[in-house]
């Protein structure tokens, strides 16, 4: 950076009438900067005319000013007979570049990342002429780790600092949150989701439909499923799932569910709730102690189209079958299947409570 000096000349001379005036004149040389400053060594010489004078004080030849100063006064006074002449100059020298630091206009948002536009700022300290201006650079992308912006400061003498980098991480892209769903259970709800790029997932529960007042966080973690217990059957619950990445970006999804006593599907294994299938599924469930057989019922559009009594905890649906003398086939649509356990001989018609109900979609 450049440094500068300021020159101010003051002088006077007293001469007798008719005599040749005694004059003292300074000659200043050095690299000029801004605002009257010099940015390097300054040399002050004196020219005194006519000859034969006597130096009263100052007037040293080739006075060198080699250190920074906010105002160094250099003087010369000479006498010739009855005449006296005086002159002075004030030098301002600054040949030192500012000391500079770089920062953002705020602290990083989360995890050492900025997640929305910022401005990189540079600030400086200059002990002689003072700071005139510093760089300021806005940034709004692209996302990257180790973004580097450079800047610096200029002092009032015109000295410019070395370029100083500001290095930071920038990420404004939220994680990908998909497949948010909630399935009813007996006095509970089973939630599932898929979150790519997330470091934490929060689940908030509210009572009622969309826009209902939130009742609090019921899950925090890194998993992809959660079962909420202790709910009231028949009451509607809305869940807000929020996935956050390291930079603090969030993605949200929601699902609404109404638990019922008949909604428990802990005994049902596959297909999963709401599964989308292209072929007849194998219905599977957990074995029930002392059960002699099971009753599987299949519904489409609210109408029962199949009832079967397998003795093992599974039943393979077919693409075509007969039920109550009518032919049926597995066409595109939504199906619901229900399951009971039977005890003793089938003719006794001894069934336990509903073990569960679940839907699947054929396409």
Image (tube, rainbow, N blue to C red):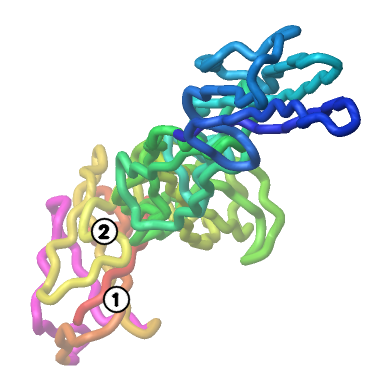
Q: Residue furthest front?
A: 18
Q: Residue at x 59, y 57 (%)?
A: 237
**Residue 27 placement, left or right of 276:** right
Please name the residue that numbered disc 2 is placed on. Answer: 272
Does dot 2 land on a helix, a strand or a loop? loop
Indicate the quadrant containing the N terminus: top left, top right, bottom left or bottom right. top left
Q: From mark 1 to mark 2, how far is it between C-alphas? A: 12 Å
User: On the image, which quarter does residue 169 sit in?
Assistant: top left
Return the x and y of residue 319 as percentages of the image width and height: 9, 81
Q: Is 192 situated above or below 226?
A: below
Indicate the quadrant containing the C terminus: top left, top right, bottom left or bottom right. bottom left
The verdict on residue 312 being magenta is yes
Q: Which residues are magenta?
A: 303-326
In the image shown, does 284 or 123 lie closer to the viewer? Answer: 123
In the image shown, does 169 or 267 lie closer to the viewer? Answer: 169
- For the question of whether residue 186 can be seen, the reply is no
Q: Is 351 situated above or below 41?
A: below
The verdict on residue 140 being magenta is no
Return the x and y of residue 20 as percentages of the image width and height: 76, 31
Res. 335 mark: 1
The 10 Å Cα crowd at callout 2, few under 14, some 14 to 19, many 20 or more, is few
Q: How many marks?
A: 2
Q: Residue at x 60, y 34 (%)?
A: 37
Return the x and y of residue 5 as percentages of the image width and height: 60, 30
Q: Nearer the viewer, mark 1 or mark 2?
A: 2
Res. 233 mark: none
**Residue 199 placement, left or right of 24:** left
- For the question of whether residue 310 can be seen, the reply is yes
In the image shown, does 81 or 354 lie closer to the viewer? Answer: 81
Return the x and y of residue 336 as percentages of the image width and height: 32, 71
């Amino acid at each position: 950076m450049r440094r500068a000096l300021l020159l101010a000349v003051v002088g006077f001379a007293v001469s007798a009438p008719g005599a040749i005036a005694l004059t003292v004149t300074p000659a200043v040389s050095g690299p000029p900067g801004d605002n009257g400053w010099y940015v390097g060594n300054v040399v002050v010489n004196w020219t005194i005319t006519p000859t034969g004078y006597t130096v009263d004080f100052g007037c040293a030849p080739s006075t060198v000013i080699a250190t920074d100063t906010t105002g160094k006064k250099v003087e010369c006074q000479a006498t010739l007979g009855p005449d006296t002449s005086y002159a002075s100059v004030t030098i301002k020298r600054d040949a030192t570049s500012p000391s500079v630091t770089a920062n953002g206009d705020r602290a990083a948002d989360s995890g050492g990342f900025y997640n929305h536009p910022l401005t990189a700022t540079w600030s400086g300290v200059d002990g002689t002429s003072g700071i005139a201006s510093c760089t300021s650079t806005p940034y709004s992308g692209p996302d990257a780790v180790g973004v580097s912006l450079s800047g610096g400061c200029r002092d009032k003498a015109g000295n410019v600092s070395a370029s100083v980098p500001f290095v930071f991480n920038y990420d404004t892209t939220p994680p990908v949150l998909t497949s948010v769903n909630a399935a009813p259970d007996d006095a509970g709800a089973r939630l599932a989701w898929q979150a790519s790029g997330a470091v934490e997932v929060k689940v908030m529960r509210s009572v009622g439909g969309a826009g209902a007042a939130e009742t609090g966080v019921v899950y925090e973690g890194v998993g992809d499923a959660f079962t909420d217990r202790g709910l009231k059957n028949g009451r509607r619950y809305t869940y807000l799932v929020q996935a956050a990445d390291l930079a603090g970006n969030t993605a949200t999804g929601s699902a609404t569910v109404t638990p019922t006593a008949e909604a428990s599907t802990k005994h049902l294994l596959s297909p999963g709730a709401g599964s989308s299938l292209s072929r007849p599924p194998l219905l599977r469930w957990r074995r029930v102690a002392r059960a002699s057989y099971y009753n599987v019922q299949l519904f489409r559009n609210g109408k029962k189209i199949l009832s079967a009594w397998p003795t093992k905890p599974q039943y393979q649906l077919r693409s075509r079958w007969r039920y109550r003398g009518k032919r049926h086939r597995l066409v595109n649509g939504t199906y619901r299947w229900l399951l009971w356990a039977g005890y003793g001989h089938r003719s006794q018609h001894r069934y336990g409570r509903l073990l569960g109900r679940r839907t699947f979609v054929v396409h």
